[in-house]
Structures are given as C-alpha cells and as structure tokens.
Image: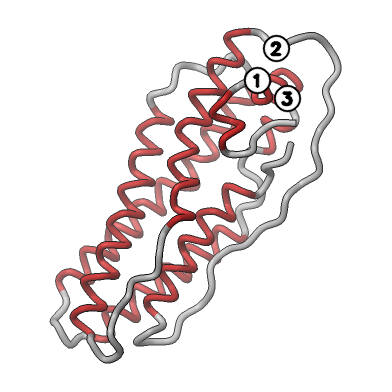
Amino acid sequence: MRRSGALVGTVGMAVAVILGACSDDQPSGTGATSATDSPDTRSGGAPADEDVAWMNAFCGELGKLEGLSDTQQPDVEPGDVAGAQRALSDVLGNFASTVSSTLQGLEGLPPAPEPAGEQAKQQLLDIFTPIEQQVADAQVNLDAAGPDDTQAIFDAGQTMTSIGTSMQQTGDPLGSIEDSPELSAAAAQAPNCQDIAIGP
C-alpha cells in the first residue's frame, strides 16, 4: 500500500508547524516524519461491496487528519507574546477539533467486514484519544495564561514535542489493513482512500 506512514507524517507535519510557532518565543523539538512503504500485491477477484463501502467510510474519517497538513504557521510579530498566544491557541484548537471529529467518526463506523479493519480502527482510537486530550489541555492552559507569559508558550511547545515523539514511535497504524488482501483491494476501489493515497 502506498500510504504506510503517510497518516503519521501528516499529523507530524501539523505538530511541526505548531512547534514552529512555539519556537518563535521559546525553543522546542520537532514533529514526526515517516517514510512510505512498498505496495502490497493481492491475488483473487474483485473486492466485496461491503468491504469497499466500509473502507470508503473509514478513509473518509482519516481524510480529516490529512487536512492537518494544510496547517499554516501563525504570522506573529517578534516580541508580541499575547499575539503569539492567541495565534497558537487557534492552531491548537483547530488541531484538537480535527482529531476530535475524526475520533467521533471512527467510533461511529459500523463493524468492519474484516477483523483487520477493527484492529486498525482500534489502534487509531488508542493513538489519537490521548493526543486529543493533551492538545485540548494545552490550549486551556495557554488561554488561561497572562498576556506576557512566555512560559505558557514554552509549555505548549513541550506538549507538542511530546506528541511528536510519540507519533514517531507509533509505527504504521494501518498495517493490519495492508496485510488484509480483502481490505487492501477494497481500498483500491474506494474513492476516499484514493484521496489520501491508501491502496495497492
């Protein structure tokens, strides 16, 4: 499959953008990056309609995370701590909202037609549920800080550094789908999966 670590890389890019905003006032780490795996091959006939429908819905939810790659670093004047706080809060809020929407969508999916689908869904929920809370907490703490509180910006950066590190250690959350001939073939037929480069 072409996508392998693309999902992790997309979120990692958004983390890196947020860290870039933090580093305007305080030093912080970098986000996650990942490479693309080699494609799988599949033998057999056309995928079942229910497999294609489920994968299309699944990829539709993941497409929300892909949108994080469009996150732009806030444009803040040097020394404008309050402005940096507001801009960073907006970015954190968008990040948390996107992850929250994805989690809700994944939880609302019908049972997967193959065990590999349930495994991939659960792994994604396990990865992003704590991230959602971490980012939301970082935004709350930043919003509660005083207008000259550079430490709050640094703390937000530390949170995103931690998330970036954990994303680097995640591996491929969609590996079970890659290993499933049925779902891998279904992804090749699902339009939403093609939008995010999931498929053989």
Residue occupying the point 64% across, 38% down: 197
Of pointers 1 and 2, the one earlier in the residue sequence: 2
The spot of residue 105 in percent (x, y) is 38, 30
Label 1 – label 2 distance at C-alpha: 8 Å
The residue tagged 1 is: 189
Circle 1 SS class = helix
Front residue of 113/147: it is 147
Q: Can you say whether 4 is above or below 137 in the image?
A: above
Q: What residue type is labelled 2?
A: Pro
Residue picked out by circle 3: 180
Question: Split into 4 quadrants, where in the image is the N terminus?
Answer: top right
Tell me if label 1 and label 2 are in contact, CB under 8 Å. yes
Q: In this view, does 87 lie above or below 53?
A: below
Instruction: Determine which quarter of the picture holds residue 104.
Output: top left
Mark 3 surroundings within 10 Å by alpha-carbon count, few (fewer than 14), some (14 through 19), many (20 or more): some
Q: Which of 162 and 18 is in front in this view?
A: 18
Image check: 12 left or right of 188? Answer: left
Name the residue rendered at 34%, 87% in the picture: 25
10 Å neighbourhood of mark 2: few (<14), some, or many (≥20)? some
Give the labeled residue for mark 2: 47
Image check: 83 left or right of 162? left
The amino acid pointed to by label 1 is: Gln
Q: Residues within 10 Å of mark 1 (few under 14, many from 20)?
A: many
Q: Could you tell me which secondary element the residue under label 3 belongs to?
A: loop
Q: Which label belongs to residue 94? A: none
Residue 171 percent location from the top left of the image: 66, 51
Determine the secondary structure under disc 2.
loop
